[in-house]
Image: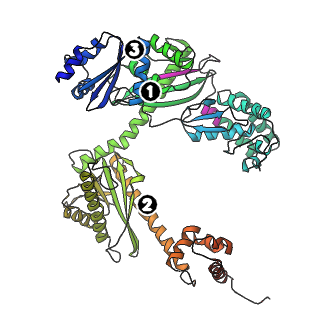
């Protein structure tokens, strides 16, 4: 401990407030205390009573700041705001990597539309949800708009200004207030019914759908009747309209939490009008060592913005629950009950949240087994010292040696990363020589990565942060011993020693460098399924690019016979019309809109295609 830090500890006040632990200028942790002197000194006392997480944090602390407040409530409010602002590494944080969608309605508009939003930010909006996905929301709105055709379009509507109706009106999914034939009051009556439905009151909608189903059946239109039956079933499946709590008129959220490796997973069920209308899962990173009550307090403080239900059902008591309740009342303008149910309907709701939580944990465990677990299994099979995080797969595609291309696909921790895929046009190899082509592409990829790493180091940047500078931990070559040998020779020529293997498709056998015997993994092995996915992605990605090149060359060759169309105009025409079919159908006016093509050349191009069309050219009349 530095003398400056010791002096700060000795001069701490016996006052409530917040403290900000720092290391090298970075805020590592934000906490609150009724007595700052006692609380902050605890960190620097005997380390034996600290958790591994706290011990790791204390080793990094070289400074701290304090902020004095009047009392416990103010300290809690300040702590919440500082955590949201700075998101310190060692605090219990709500990871914001997945924002569940809501239906949002801007009630300030004369004809409010239904929107899908990921955040509850704007005042004057009403929000419904959260829902599992935007797809689920669209399904619900499609069904609701069969009965109450409100608008979802983005048109700006001004009362008194009529617009042309769009396809939604023609399909019977919108009453077209844009045409001026509907009053705001009449539209609002329709919208209120949709908002009631989104709040969980599904009976009016399902009753109308059942009437239509029965009418269709009476008219022997059984196909349409079955469609209405499916609509009803889907609505019931999504919104689960059974009475969930028996407490009508009360807005409740039910929280359950459990460790998920080093993290904590929080499941949140939304109960509206006594019905379960939504469920969402959230991750609190690096919180597994913390008391569950503190984790849930951190979740509540960070999750609720703009609106909070009247009651939160909790699996365990919260520390400083009275202070938290006061803060929620002050922030949202109404009392919030923090209830730990012991029996009855609320206890059953808590059990339902726990059941949902265990289901999500089981799905995550299965996903982990297929990704990170598969990488660990593959490392054992290949005899690697550690699990490979970044795996790259390579494949060569050509047609009888023409237009050879190579594909590079990437997995990180067993998850494919399409944004990091790359294509390579083979430049130094003539004909169908996959061995030499593989040597070229591995040389180009790795040498560019080495140059980029050095450039970033020279600039003081993270060497792995470039497009190619993050070198692979493992390389998969689609092919047998020949392709693998040429790829490995290219890698060794650059002074690298990256583990590499081939995957031969005949028996799905793993080929290792300089080993006669191949490795056959169990057909049910997650490791085998992982490398098959990577190999298939490399093949698919390469084939798709090769087909695109062939189509482009074919389209370009069609233009070779047109006088006045050189390489520059050829490129401009193909860029403008995308496909040769669109180009052939274009008239002179459309052709003249292409850069570099005047009216005269447009007349020549149109005439060329007209004369060369099937059955085209001049001919006498019969």
Q: Secondary structure at mark 1?
A: strand
Separation of residues labelled 3 and 1 (CA atoms): 31 Å
Look at the image and tell me whether residue 505 can be seen: no
Residue at the spot 35% in from the left edge and 75% down from the top edge: 432
Separation of residues labelled 1 and 2 (CA atoms): 38 Å
Residue 537 percent across, percent down from the top left: 41, 56
Q: Quadrant of the C terminus?
A: bottom right
Rendering quarter of residue 386:
top left
Q: Are marks 3 and 1 in contact (CB under 8 Å)?
A: no
Bounds of the magenta span?
234-255
Q: Magenta stretch containing residue 240, yes or no?
A: yes
Rendering quarter of residue 90:
top left
Q: Which residue is mark 2?
A: 540
Q: Between disc 2 and disc 3, whose residue precedes?
A: 3
Report whether 98 appears left or right of 139.
Answer: left
Q: Secondary structure at mark 2?
A: helix
Point out which mark residue 266 bears: 1
Report whether 304 appears left or right of 86.
Answer: right
Frontmost of labels 2 and 3 is 3
560 vs 465: above or below: below
Residue at the spot 26% in from the left edge and 59% down from the top edge: 451
Q: Which residue is mark 3?
A: 69
Q: Secondary structure at mark 3?
A: loop
Report whether 282 appears left or right of 102.
Answer: left
Q: Magenta stretch containing residue 507, yes or no?
A: no
Residue 51 percent across, percent down from the top left: 26, 22
User: Could you classify mark 2 by the number of other residues whose Cα lies within 10 Å: few (under 14), some (14-19), or many (20 or more)?
Assistant: some
Residue 205 percent across, percent down from the top left: 72, 32
Look at the image and tell me whether residue 256 can be seen: yes
């Amino acid at each position: 401990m530095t003398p400056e830090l010791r002096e700060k500890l000795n001069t701490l006040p016996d006052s409530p407030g917040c403290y900000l632990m720092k290391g090298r200028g970075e805020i590592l942790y934000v906490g609150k205390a009724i007595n700052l002197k006692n609380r902050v000194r605890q960190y620097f006392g005997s380390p034996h009573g600290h958790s591994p997480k706290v011990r790791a944090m204390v080793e990094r602390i070289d400074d701290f700041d304090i902020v004095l407040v009047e009392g416990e409530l103010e300290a809690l409010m300040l702590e919440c705001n500082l955590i949201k602002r700075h998101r310190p590494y060692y605090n219990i944080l709500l990871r914001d990597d997945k924002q569940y969608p809501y239906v949002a309605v801007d009630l300030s508009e004369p004809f409010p539309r239904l929107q899908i939003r990921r955040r509850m930010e704007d005042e004057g909006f009403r929000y419904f949800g959260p829902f599992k996905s935007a797809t689920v929301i669209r399904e619900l709105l499609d069904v609701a708009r069969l009965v109450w055709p409100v608008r979802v379009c983005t048109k700006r509507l001004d009362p008194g200004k009529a617009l042309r109706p769009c396809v939604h009106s023609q399909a019977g999914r919108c009453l077209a207030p844009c045409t001026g034939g509907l009053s705001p009051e009449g539209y609002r009556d329709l919208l209120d019914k949709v908002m009631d439905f989104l709040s969980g009151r599904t009976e009016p909608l399902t009753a109308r759908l059942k009437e239509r189903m029965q009418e269709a059946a009476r008219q022997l239109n059984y196909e349409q009747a079955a469609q209405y039956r499916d609509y009803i079933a889907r609505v019931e499946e999504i919104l689960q309209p059974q009475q969930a709590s028996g407490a009508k008129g009360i807005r409740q959220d039910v929280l359950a939490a459990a460790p998920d490796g080093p993290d904590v997973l929080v499941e949140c069920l939304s109960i509206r009008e006594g019905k379960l209308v939504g469920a969402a899962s959230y991750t609190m990173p690096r919180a597994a060592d913390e008391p569950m009550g503190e984790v849930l307090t951190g979740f509540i403080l960070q999750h609720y913005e703009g609106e909070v239900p009247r009651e939160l059902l909790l699996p365990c008591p919260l520390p400083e629950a009275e202070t938290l309740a006061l803060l929620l009342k002050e922030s949202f303008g109404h009392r919030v009950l923090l209830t730990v149910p012991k029996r009855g309907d609320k206890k059953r709701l808590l059990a339902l949240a726990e059941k949902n939580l265990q289901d999500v944990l089981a799905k995550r465990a299965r996903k982990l087994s297929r990704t990170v677990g598969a990488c660990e299994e593959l490392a054992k099979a290949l005899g690697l010292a550690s699990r490979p995080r970044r795996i790259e797969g390579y494949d060569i595609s050509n047609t009888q040696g023409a237009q050879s291309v190579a594909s590079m696909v990437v997995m990180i921790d067993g998850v494919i990363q399409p944004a990091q895929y790359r294509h390579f046009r083979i430049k130094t190899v003539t004909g169908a020589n996959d061995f030499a082509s593989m040597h070229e592409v591995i040389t180009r990829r790795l040498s560019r990565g080495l140059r980029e790493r050095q450039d970033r180091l020279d600039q003081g940047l993270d060497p792995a942060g470039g497009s190619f500078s993050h070198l692979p931990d493992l390389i998969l070559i689609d092919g047998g011993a020949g392709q693998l040998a040429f790829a490995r020779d290219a890698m060794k020529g650059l002074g690298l020693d990256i583990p590499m293997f081939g995957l031969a498709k005949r028996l799905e056998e793993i080929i290792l460098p300089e080993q006669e015997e191949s490795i056959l993994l169990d057909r049910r092995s997650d490791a085998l399924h992982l490398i098959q996915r990577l190999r298939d992605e490399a093949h698919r990605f390469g084939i798709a690019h090769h087909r695109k090149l062939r189509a482009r060359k074919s389209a370009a060759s069609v233009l070779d016979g047109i006088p006045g169309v050189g390489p520059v105009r050829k490129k401009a025409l193909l860029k403008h019309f995308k496909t040769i079919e669109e180009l052939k159908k274009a008239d002179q006016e459309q052709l003249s809109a292409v850069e570099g093509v005047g009216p005269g050349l447009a007349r020549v191009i149109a005439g060329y295609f007209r004369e060369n069309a099937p059955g085209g050219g001049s001919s006498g009349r019969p």
